[in-house]
Image (cartoon, rainbow, N blue to C red):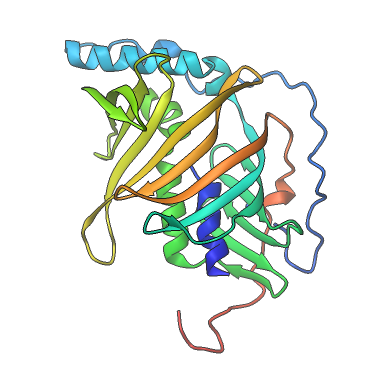
Amino acid sequence: MRKLAILLLAVSPAMAQIASQPVPSSQPPAQTPAAPSSAPFGLAALASQPGEDLNAKKGRDLLQKMITKLGGEAYLSFRTVTQHGRSYAFYQGRPNSVGVEFWRFYKYPDKDRSELTKQRDVVYIIDGDKGYEITYKGTAAQDQPVLAETLRRRSHSLEIVLREWLKDPKTIVFYEGPATANQKLVEQVSIVNSANEQVTIAIDANDTLPVRRVFTFRDPVDKLKDEDGELYANYRLVQGIMTAHSITRTKNGDMTNQRFINEVQYNVPIAESQFDARVSYDPYKRSGKR
């Protein structure tokens, strides 16, 4: 089950009723036309701030172009995402599984449900700062290290950085200059929030779409600095939003996971019950380990 949890980390970026209740139907909710809700902030928020130098201005201009290319207000205002695809885990840069089919239901900003395997009989839920794993045995609290990694990645995701960090007047933007990422010429922009957390985005120099997102953190166990990265490719226009259909996760430069998305929809209603869970057993109770 831990292997599936590792695979799930890809479902980012980015999960149910207790096991005694039925898993939701394999058919996604019918799509209904939904007027986009008001955006958390407009593109105008990326305008240069008083006192900012030319470096910061260039960084904000690049971010504005990137968000416009992603879909502008459509990107900034989507409330839900549903995905179906396949996820592959890697160890030391090499695949260690044949992959697993997944369905993902995400409700901005902090609710996430993933169903794994063809039978969709392994379910992971993130609801706020709580995580659950549901199998035929019942519902267990998610392992703390796995949950901590998921929450850390969420708080540094593109959606949170672009929709939350940038609207804070205390956030600082730096233009880092040209570089290469995923065999593309990019321009890098770093965003530092009021908590002194930094995310660097590599933006394609030609089409201004994001190519890579990276941040560093101190490992709570060995206290060393680690780097968490994501590479984005195979963009397609979906409901007015440019959407990466291939996402590769890296840690300290090594590939750890790859997702290939076959279907994606935005603003499809997702019932709150999809994220309900209640712990029914402790997998460590018999072994006494934790």
Question: Residue 201 falls in which quadrant of the image?
Answer: top left
Q: Number of marks in the image?
A: 0
Residue 218 visible to the viewer:
yes
Left of 145 or right of it: where is 234? Answer: right
Of residues 128 and 240, the one nearer the viewer is: 240
Q: Residue 216, how many percent across, how many down?
A: 27, 46
Of residues 215 and 172, the one nearer the viewer is: 215
Q: Quadrant of the C terminus?
A: bottom left
Left of 45 or right of it: where is 41? Answer: right
Which residue shows up at 43% across the image and 38% down it?
A: 157
Which residue shows up at 32% across the image and 11% down it?
A: 61
Q: Residue 24, how many percent across, how many down?
A: 79, 52
Q: Residue 204, how many percent across, how many down?
A: 37, 20
Q: Is residue 194 above or below residue 9?
A: above
Q: Residue 209, how many percent across, how many down?
A: 44, 21
Residue 170 visible to the viewer:
no
Q: Is residue 108 above or below residue 87?
A: above
